[in-house]
Amino acid sequence: MNKRILVVLVSVIMFGLCGCNGGGTGDEQEYYGGDDMSIYEESDGTVVYDFEPEKSKVEHSDGKLTERTEDSIEVSAPEGSIDMKKAEELIDSCSYEEFYLPSKVSGYQKYYSGTVEKNRKKYYAISLYLEKDSVRMYVGTNILVACDGSEILKQSWTGSYMSVELGGSKNDPSSEKLYKNVKVMPEDALFALNNVSPEKLGLDQKLSAYTFEIDNKLYTRKSLKCYQITPKLTYENTTKMASPIYVVADGTNRIMMKIEDKEDYKEIK
């Protein structure tokens, strides 16, 4: 059976609607395929879900892996461009759901990785991150802000870039409304991943190489309410999703993952 499945772009939209967005709690299944799944968009707009990416390298180039350092980079932009402060304000004006975040965009720090050209237009390339005890973890997705301030693009699950609506943050609920009766917020739960090795989490890169998506609802795993955190490696042309990781929302920093080939979960120690 051919495991390289082609679907039209509308499928990705539906895919997103049953993924990060939404509220409430429950026993929903994870929405990503696993640590050997690659998603990208071909030149004709066809979206490819590739479940055997290692066998498809001849057919498709992932491009360069997104790399970030903790060193600041001098901002470079054409004459007449908006400054970085204005670019960050434009990002903060967007709804958190646009960037696959669990809470308001203004709560995240911004990392400028350079100025890039796309479709003959210059953009600031920016990533979002959280930092705790000198440990930095990247979240959400890669962002491009037009140097003239006219638009913002985000990297979608296919690896391609799509336009983001400005001004949506005015409708964002507070974290207190989103996460009731929990002892730890999703941003803090993310740092529990540093308590175990990447290998135990099913990851083959160091944590700093990944961007993490934290779903904005709770999942029930082993009768416990958990945050679902999905690591992903972002390339120029591809996004590679790893299997979701679950952090219990009671402040104990317990981590659970799905047992391979079983509808059950185990605690990772």
Image (cartoon, helix red, strand yellow):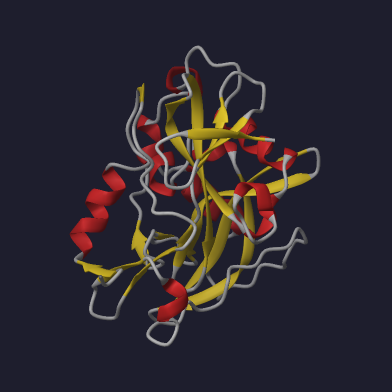
Quarter placement of the C terminus: top right
**Residue lying at 73% horizontally and 62% vertically, measured from the top left:** 69
Q: Nearer the viewer, residue 112 or 8?
A: 8
Residue 32 visible here: yes
Residue reaching furthest right?
Answer: 134
Q: Nearer the viewer, residue 18 or 108?
A: 18
Quarter placement of the N terminus: bottom left
Q: Position of residue 139 (x, y in %)?
A: 56, 48
The image shows residue 70, relative to residue 257, as above or below, that is below
The reply, left or right, for residue 97 in relation to residue 207 is left
The image shows residue 93, relative to residue 247, as above or below, that is below
Q: Position of residue 6 (x, y in %)?
A: 23, 70
Residue reaching furthest top?
Answer: 181
**Residue lying at 38% horizontally and 68% vertically, measured from the top left:** 160
The image shows residue 253, relative to residue 13, as above or below, that is above
The reply, left or right, for residue 39 in relation to residue 64 is left
The reply, left or right, for residue 13 in relation to residue 119 is left
Residue reaching furthest front?
Answer: 261
- The image quadrant of residue 111 is bottom right
> How many marks on residues?
0
Residue 103 visible here: no
Q: Position of residue 172 (x, y in %)?
A: 39, 30
Q: Position of residue 227 (x, y in %)?
A: 51, 31
Q: Nearer the viewer, residue 92 or 228?
A: 228
**Residue lying at 48% horizontally and 78% vertically, measured from the top left:** 117
